[in-house]
Image (cartoon, grey):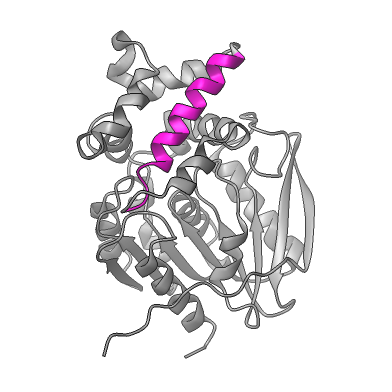
Amino acid sequence: MTEVLRTLYPEIEPFETGHLDVGDGHSIYWERVGTRGAKPAVFLHGGPGGGINPNQRRLFDPALYDVILFDQRGCGKSTPHASLDANTTWHLVADIERLREMTGAEKWQVFGGSWGSTLALAYAETHAERVSELVLRGIYTLTKGELDWYYQFGVSEMFPDKWEPFVAAIPEDERHELMHAYNRRLIGDDKAEQLRCAKAWSVWEGSTITLLPDHKMQEDFAGDHFAIAFARIENHFFVNAGWLEEGQLLRDAYKLKGIPGTIVHGRYDMPCPLKYAWQLSKAWPDADFHIIEGAGHAVSEPGITDRLIRTTDRFAGKG
């Protein structure tokens, strides 16, 4: 008998929201869902620069969890919008700690997908004593190999139709280093050029993260307000290699020893090759590792949603 796939919990509104002044001129928007005083967790969104959305609240049983979701610096409802100043991996790690202190949790579950998995690993390797469990999807360790695969040569071979408009935004003589060519335009003074390149950068991602085309997702990624923050912040992080040493997150995975965890990765994840999730599973044997067949990158892939919800239920002692 085929097991029925789990789906998202019903729509839910936050029971508390606010903005936290984290210094450096930044104010981050946060929201809290579930049941106050239940199992504490923090959700780390992707991008960088992607912001949170209401469906992400629904990955946790609201009767059993007290979850903080927040827009990382410069995106979503956080201000200033699309700002790159004082916006690095380590600023975000410090912001997560500020949010934990705000809630009063001694430890909490850290849940991150895609770039959120990168940030979750950076946080957990820095503050292992504050992590009760790690739930990671779409592993991204931000190595040069991963960046080149998505932004120079690799996924380009699988999606030539989507790649063509991505490279078309950049003159031919600059295409040998596309991330840096985009960076010059995304931080430049020409606002029209900045937006044109932001949309091309953003649509490339929105077009390649699902196994089958999701036209609504592609439209969302093409929106001006979303694209300008997403592209500027993501490119800013990636041209700076996340302010990480090459291979740092895998090298330091020994610091996760004793933290229970789950790694969930789609077999056909284009932005984040499975190889790196495989390597993490070897370096962190405390984690369960689930390769989801017939799935791409996005959390909306049915098999990925199913496994993540089974995981949050299990860590809350359910089932």
Q: Percent from the top left, x then y, of residue 134?
A: 47, 67
- Which quadrant would residue 224 be assigned to in this image? top right
Q: Looking at the image, is 279 positioned above or below residue 238?
A: below
Residue range of the region highlighted in magenta in the rendering: 191-211
Question: Quick check: 62 above or below 104?
Answer: below
Report the front residue among 185 and 280.
185
Residue 192 in magenta stretch: yes
Q: Residue at x 58, y 50 (%)?
A: 93
Can residue 15 be seen at all in this image of the molecule? yes
- As drawn, the residue found furthest toward the top would be 173
In the drawing, does residue 86 fall left or right of residue 148? right
Q: Position of residue 18 (x, y in %)?
A: 79, 55
How many badges with numbers are in the image? 0
Q: Locate residue 259: give its quadrant.
A: bottom left
Is 217 on the left or on the right of 172, as rendered?
right
x and y percentages locating residue 10 in the rendered image: 60, 74
* In the foreground, 218 or 256: 218
Q: Is residue 137 left or right of residue 58?
A: left
* Residue 240, visible in the rendered structure: no
Furthest residue to the left?
157
Q: Is residue 301 magenta?
A: no
- Horizontal side of 67 relative to 20 (left or right) equals left
Frontmost residue, 38 versus 216: 216
Q: Residue at x 47, y 36 (%)?
A: 243
Q: Residue at x 30, y 25 (%)?
A: 164
Q: Residue furthest front?
A: 215
Please identify the quadrant where the N terminus is shown: bottom left
Residue 112 percent across, percent down from the top left? 49, 59
- Residue at image coords 43%, 28%: 239
Q: Does residue 52 sit above or below 149 in this rendering?
A: below
The dominant secondary structure in magenta is helix
